[in-house]
Every structure is written in structure tokens, then in C-alpha cells.
Image (cartoon, helix red, strand yellow):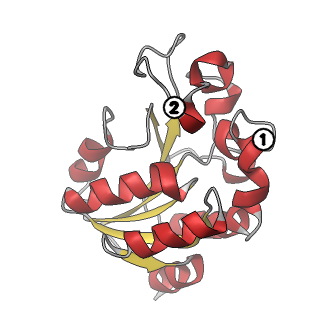
Amino acid sequence: MQNSALLVLHYQNSVTHPKGVWGKNMYAQISKNGAYENARAALSSARSVVLPVVYVNVACRPGAPELPDALYGIVENARDTEDCLSGSWGAQPIDELAPEKNDIQIENFNSDAFQGTALDQFLRARGITTVYLIGQVIEHVVGTTMKRAANSGYSTVLLADCVGGYSDMTRDAMLDILAGYGRISDSNEFAQEVHG
């Protein structure tokens, strides 16, 4: 575990809080299987052995100049809300999974935690070769980041019980797809590995 890190992806107010710009439509689905509680347990396990914890939160500057002109689907209203502004309530991790003093926080502006961020540099500078992933949602930042990490040479482990999806069907399909990019595990196995 000494060359491992835990990535906490978009577990923030705008995405996962019931009053967030996206959370208001997704909260019931992404929270129904204990994902929040399991994510809290995974964080506790990681911190118990001082495993690096890296939060990646989606945020933009005023007017969202980072985003393309044509926005579709879930992100099409990103420019119309202050929930996406850097430093706003929406860009902050949810209280239940609040960062601690030594945790790293990185902002990104799309569904790839590596693109346009210092994530890869941070991981390589610390000799990280394995990344464990938790976050919301699997069809968006979690899936994209896991694929990018695997394609960049990292070993990847998805803690599936800490991740929700737009629907049960799409979440299950993504779990099948992502098994081709790394190992699918859960917070209980993670705790055993950390303390094993």
C-alpha cells in the first residue's frame, strides 16, 4: 500500500448534495446503496495508515471559460449556476466526507481528473503506482479517470460500493466495462488490504 493513493472524485455539494445543481436530480439514485457511508469508511481506512488522499472537485472560473461553447446533457447548465464557481459551496466536498489537513485538493473542469490538472504530477512525485477510486458518478468522472489512469500506467482499483450512477443499468454496465481497466473491489476489501 505504500505506493498507493485514494482518489475522491466529485464527492462535492454540486454533484452529491440533495440541494446541489446536479445533486438535486441524482441524490436519490447515487445515495441509495450506502455509497456515502462506504466512502466514509474507505476514507477512514486510508487515513488510518496515512495513505495519500486526493480530492478532485469540479469547478470553473466566472463564465466558465474552461468549457466549450456547446454543452450537452448534464453539464449544459454549468454556466448558469454559481454552484460551479471555484470557491463556492458547490465546489466544496460534502461535509460527510470533508478533507483533513494533509489531504490534497485539486480542481478540474470536466470528466477527466487528469486533464488540465496537476494530478499526474502529484502522484508521480510521490511514487504512486496504484490509485484507488471513489466518487460520483461512474458514467462521468469516475469512469473517465479510471480509464485515463490505467492508460497512463497506473494500477487502478475501483471501490464499487463507494460509487453511484445515473441508473442501476448504466452503473452495472460501467462496472463491466471498467473491469477491463483495473480491479473492481469494495470498501471492505480495501480495509482488509490496508490493515492486512
Q: Nearer the viewer, residue 29 or 121?
A: 29
* Residue at 31% from the left image edge and 32% from the top image edge: 116
Which of disc 2 and disc 1 is earlier in sequence?
Answer: 1
The residue tagged 1 is 24
As drawn, 145 above or below 104: below
Is 113 left or right of 80, judged from the image as shown? left
Q: x%, y% of residue 24?
A: 78, 41
* Residue at 30% from the left image edge and 69% from the top image edge: 181
Q: x%, y% of residue 145?
A: 37, 53
Q: Quadrant of the C terminus?
A: bottom left
As drawn, 57 above or below 67: below
* Residue at 39% from the left image edge and 69% from the top image edge: 178
Q: x%, y% of residue 165?
A: 61, 59
The residue tagged 2 is 72
Res 181 visible: yes
Q: Nearer the viewer, residue 176 or 142?
A: 176
Q: Secondary structure at mark 2?
A: loop
Q: Which mark is residue 55?
A: none
Q: Give the amino acid type for the residue marked by disc 1 in the picture.
A: Lys
Q: Give the amino acid type for the residue marked by disc 2 in the picture.
A: Tyr
Q: How would you rate the neighbour count of disc 1 (Cα within 10 Å): few for under 14, some for 14-19, many for 20 or more? A: some
Q: How would you rate the neighbour count of disc 2 (Cα within 10 Å): few for under 14, some for 14-19, many for 20 or more? A: few
Is 144 left or right of 100, judged from the image as shown? left
Q: Quadrant of the N terminus?
A: bottom left
